[in-house]
Image (spheres, rainbow, N blue to C red):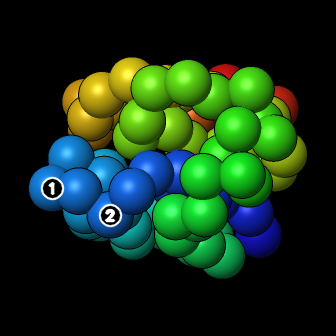
Amino acid sequence: MKQVKVLGSGCANCRNTVQIVESVAQLRGVEIALEKVEDMHKIMAYGVMRTPAVVIDGKVVHAGGVPAPATVAQWFESPAGG
């Protein structure tokens, strides 16, 4: 199971990112544990300055916009998560 965190303030782009991650994982049959992180101190601890950002298994794989579904699918193909 992949540990996935979406970092962001809860804005529309952050919510869209959560939806995309959830739907791509479901379509690909990838089991994920999804957490939404809205605390700015925790977000900054990842070194992220632009949100939404996505962290998979402890590694920041995306920051600064809504990722394309094809990009998210690639994260779930790679054993390292990106």
- Mark 2 touches mark 1? (CB < 8 Å): no
Q: Please count the marks in the image.
A: 2
The amino acid type of the residue labelled 2 equals Gly
- Residue 22 found in image quarter: bottom left
Residue in view at x 81 percent, y 41 percent: 45
In screen coordinates, is 19 left or right of 4?
Answer: left
Residue 51's mark? none
Residue 75 in the image: state x and y as whole percent.
Answer: 57, 34
- Residue 58 found in image quarter: top right
| Residue 56 appears in the picture as rendered | yes
SS at badge 2: loop
Residue 23 in the image: state x and y as whole percent.
Answer: 29, 65
Residue in view at x 52 percent, y 64 percent: 38
Give the class, few, some or many, for how many residues have Cα within 10 Å of label 1's Cα (few <14, many ≥20).
few
In screen coordinates, is 6 left or right of 10?
Answer: right
Q: Which of the pair 74/37 is nearer the observer?
A: 37
Give the class, few, some or many, for how many residues have Cα within 10 Å of label 2's Cα (few <14, many ≥20).
some
Residue in view at x 15 percent, y 56 percent: 12
| Residue 77 appears in the picture as rendered | no
Quadrant where the N terminus is found in the figure: bottom right
Residue 74 in the image: state x and y as whole percent.
Answer: 50, 29
Which residue is identified by label 1?
12
In the displayed structure, 59 sits above or below 24; it is above
In screen coordinates, is 24 left or right of 47?
Answer: left
In screen coordinates, is 51 left or right of 65?
Answer: right
Which residue is identified by label 2?
10
The amino acid type of the residue labelled 1 equals Ala
In the displayed structure, 9 sits above or below 66; it is below
SS at badge 1: helix
Mark 2–mark 1 Cα distance, whole angstroms, equals 7 Å
Residue 31 in the image: state x and y as whole percent.
Answer: 62, 73
